Amino acid sequence: MIDILNSRRTVRKYTKEMIGDELLNELLQAGCRASTTGNMQVYSIIVTRDEERKKALSPFHFNQKMVTEAPVVLTFCADFNRFNKWCELSNAEPGYDNFLSFITASIDALLVAQTVCVAAESKGLGICYLGTTTYMANKIIELLKLPKGVFPVTTVTIGWPSELPEQVDRLPRNAIIHNEFYHDYTAENIREYYSEKESRPDSKKFIAENNKQSLAQVFTDVRYKKADNVHFSKVLLQVLKDQGFMNQ
Ligand SMILES: Cc1cc2nc3c(=O)[nH]c(=O)nc-3n(C[C@H](O)[C@H](O)[C@H](O)COP(=O)(O)O)c2cc1C
């Protein structure tokens, strides 16, 4: 299992081969064995296999081609709707219309998502997460008919790999692990920890292609810009309110 984890990479190109029901169910079943807050299972998984629905989803994922090319698209949702209904039917008053509960359910949803991904990779399938879900949550909510109490946290495309991309870099383990307490970084530490990433030929190409002076600028000025972050944050807060998670 550790070998699978160490050798994995995101796969964005898939063959046309389907994923059989039995295998998909096996992955989803394994996913639902993930730890879950209070064993409440405050998540739902929407399976999209229909070509037309994948096409409809595609623009909400900024037309990333994995959405239409993968045989299976999974949208993992934070979901207090089902649990609230059970409480209400059981003469119990739910108190889950708040931000804490949203985070609780989001953690649950992400644990299931990652477990499904590891299960899929262990079967030779390739996966790609799509961060666009939280950017376009309002549109996805409409298309997938998500009721109040449900919020799409992330999406994963799954298929049989048609390519084996190179593994991408990671920061050195020392950059990530803090023994006993958080050791804040000096400028020297930061330079050291990011130097490998910055000196890679693909990073240099990335900087040149984007007409920037540093790799960090590619992130701040091109890929994850403040203006976009602020805009999508505002939209996100409104969607959380609409979905009933902001009563505090
Ligand atoms: C929450 C999340 C959102 C992501 N969103 C996207 C995405 O929208 N499009 C994409 O191509 N890859 C996406 N990825 C994949 C990352 O780009 C990828 O994991 C990262 O570059 C490291 O590559 P690796 O998984 O091959 O090690 C996402 C990953 C995560 C965890």
Image (cartoon, rainbow, N blue to C red):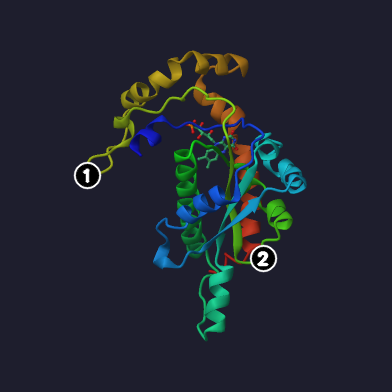
Give the alpha-carbon distance from disc 2 to disc 1, as whole Å: 43 Å
Foreground tag (2 vs 1): 2
Task: State whether label 1 is within 8 Å of ligand 1.
Answer: no
Quadrant in which residue 240 is drawn? bottom right
Determine the residue positioned at 53% across, 37% down. Answer: 125
- The answer to whether 189 appears left or right of 95 in the picture is left
- Look at the image and tell me in which quarter the N terminus lies: top left
Answer left or right for 37 relative to 127: left
In the image, residue 56 lies at what x, y percent?
76, 46
Disc assigned to residue 145? none
Q: Secondary structure at mark 1?
A: loop
Query: Can you name the residue that lies furthest to the left here?
Result: 180
Q: Secondary structure at mark 2?
A: loop
Q: Residue at x 64, y 38 (%)?
A: 70
Tag 2 residue: 147
Amino acid carrying label 1: it is Glu
Report the residue marked by disc 1.
180
Amino acid type of disc 2? Answer: Pro
**Looking at the image, is mark 2 or mark 1 earlier in the sequence?**
2
Point out residue 132 in the picture as x, y percentages from the top left corner. Answer: 63, 42
Query: In the image, is residue 71 above or below residue 103?
Result: above
